[in-house]
Image: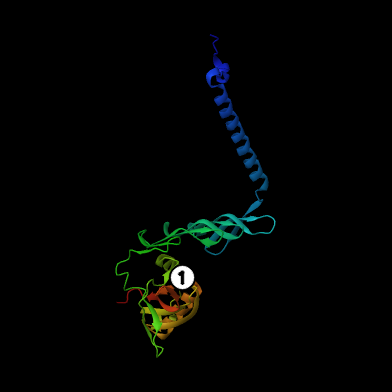
Amino acid sequence: MQKHTGMASLFYINPLHSGKNFITMKLLLLSLLFSFAISVTIAQNAPEVQEVRKSGPVYNEVFNVLKKDGTPHGAYNKYRRFKLETSGFYYEGKQDSTWIEYFDDKPITIKHFSHGERVGEWDFYDTRGNLEVKYNFATGELIDRRRNADSIHNCLIPDESGHLQPAKLDRKVVPLQSPGEFLRFQLYNLQYPIEAQDKNEQGLCLIAITIDENGKAVDYKIHRSASKSLGKEALRVVKLFNGEFLPGIQNGQKVKCVFLMPVIFKLEGVG
């Protein structure tokens, strides 16, 4: 029997299985050629991008844009005081893939998009990194792990006389940002009124946000305030935050209702 050694042995074909082996090798070669062709095509069709850097007083943004028109396309990162605040990805100007919001280097919100559409599971954490709320856009399942979850963030619906009353909902309004995101926003935007400081005024303010059937905030009002100036500032900050929501559901239908957003003012050294 003829012996094949070295590299030549790679091409030795057993006569008993020559037909089968030939077909297998042919399919393998075709697969490799097809993969190579796809790779070349993708490389040729990949849009040209360039990196953009924007800087503000306390923040920096680094992201890619399409060279042809400046549309965001590719990785996006935002830093505040040199700490990562937001990371994500754009596809032709639309949010895509995974987006993460951070607070003090900890993830506080993890969101998923597909060409601008909300998809998959969204996770909302407290500022210590503990998972509080999970919502699944595919199934509509809501998991709320907060203590006393049924008694907080109650939604209100006007009664026949127009007075707001607690609503019994199949699903309450779901804020699409964690409490940590709003807290982070307050740290950089809330301005304690001088008048309130002079009078040692502090405490809880509740801002009533009217959420329509599409989850859009259509109205903002002061529901409760520790003082006039604190209520005015709380209203300003909540409107500026411009949060996103999923609407409440009652009897299987999306309904318009009022969501209460808390803002707490606390002076150092004041009991």
Residue depicted at x 42% and y 58%: 107
**Can residue 155 be seen here?**
yes
* Of 112 and 254, the residue lying toward us: 254
Nearest the camera: 23 or 158? Answer: 23
Give the tally of numbered discs: 1
The amino acid type, in three-letter code, at marker 1 is Phe
Residue 179: give x, y in percent of width and height.
40, 67
**Direction top: furthest residue:** 1
Secondary element under disc 1, as helix, strand or loop, is: strand
- In the rendered image, which quarter contains the C terminus? bottom left
Badge 1 is on which residue? 245
76 lies above or below 196 = above
State the residue at coordinates (30%, 67%). Answer: 147
Image position, residue 108 (x, y; %): 42, 60
Residue in the foreground of this view, choosing between 14 and 213: 14
Q: In this view, does 37 lie to the left or right of 254?
A: right
Rendered view: 215 above or below 221: above
What percent of the width, then of the height, locates residue 221?
Answer: 45, 82
What is the x, y in percent for residue 198?
39, 82
Seen in the picture, residue 196 relative to 125 is either above or below; the reply is below
Q: Is residue 14 visible?
A: no
Could you say which is closer to the camera, residue 72 or residue 155? 155
Q: Residue furthest bottom?
A: 161
Image quadrant assignment for residue 25:
top right
- Residue 221 relative to residue 153: left or right: right
Q: How crowded is mark 1: few (under 14 residues within 10 Å), some or many (20 or more)?
A: some
From this viewpoint, which residue is outermost toward the right? 68
Residue 125 sits in which quadrant? bottom left
